[in-house]
Image (cartoon, rainbow, N blue to C red):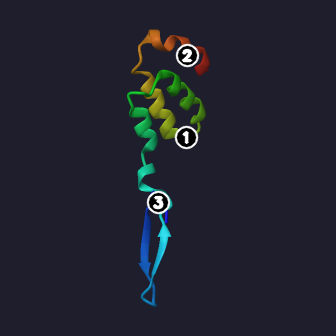
Amino acid sequence: MNKNLASKKIQDDTNSFITFPDPLPKENIGSLLKVFSSPYFTLDMAVIYLYNKKKVQGVFDYLVNKLYTYSDNEIEFYIPQLR
């Protein structure tokens, strides 16, 4: 069994255990938030993720708010690309 996958063990009628993998491994929950909060997350990356995740409402909202943390001089170059 893969160590990275979380799983659930359920005992059946014959007293043996059946193992079911969880649909989402626990270490993947919030992984985008970890990336976005990283000191290595740049304005370039924010624009790329903004384009790629434009249909995911929560991610899109977070990234738009993240853009407000950059100065006008930093973001000025990217404004035509955000249209």
Question: Given the current orientation, which residue lies at the most extreme bottom position?
Answer: 14
**Residue 49 at x, y = what percent?**
54, 32
Asked which secondary structure carries label 2, the reply is helix
Which amino acid does the dot numbered 2 rest on?
Answer: Tyr
Of residues 19 and 75, which is closer to you in this image? 19
* Horizontal relation, residue 11 to residue 77: left or right: left
Is residue 66 positioned above or below 75 on the image? below
| Label 1 secondary element | loop
Of tags 3 and 2, the one toward the viewer is: 3
Name which residue type carries label 3: Leu
Mark 1 Cα shell of 10 Å, populated few (<14), some (14-19), many (≥20): few
Mark nearest the camera among 1 and 3 is: 3
Q: Which residue is mark 3?
A: 5
Q: Residue at label 1?
A: 56
Q: Is residue 78 above or below residue 3?
A: above
Indicate which disc residue 78 carries.
Answer: 2
Classify mark 2: residues with Cα within 10 Å, few (<14), some (14-19) or many (20+): few
Q: Please state the horizontal and vertical placement of residue 27, each as a whole percent of the image.
A: 42, 51
Which mark, by number, is residue 24? none
Q: What percent of the width, then of the height, locates residue 16?
A: 44, 85
Q: Quadrant of the C terminus?
A: top right
The residue at the point 42 percent across, 39 percent down is 33
Residue at image location 39% in from the left, 33% down from the top: 37
Q: Disc 2 to disc 1, how far (Cα)?
A: 21 Å
Point out residue 73 in the picture as x, y percentages from the top left corner: 45, 9
Which numbered disc, 1 or 3, marks the residue that appears first in the sequence?
Answer: 3
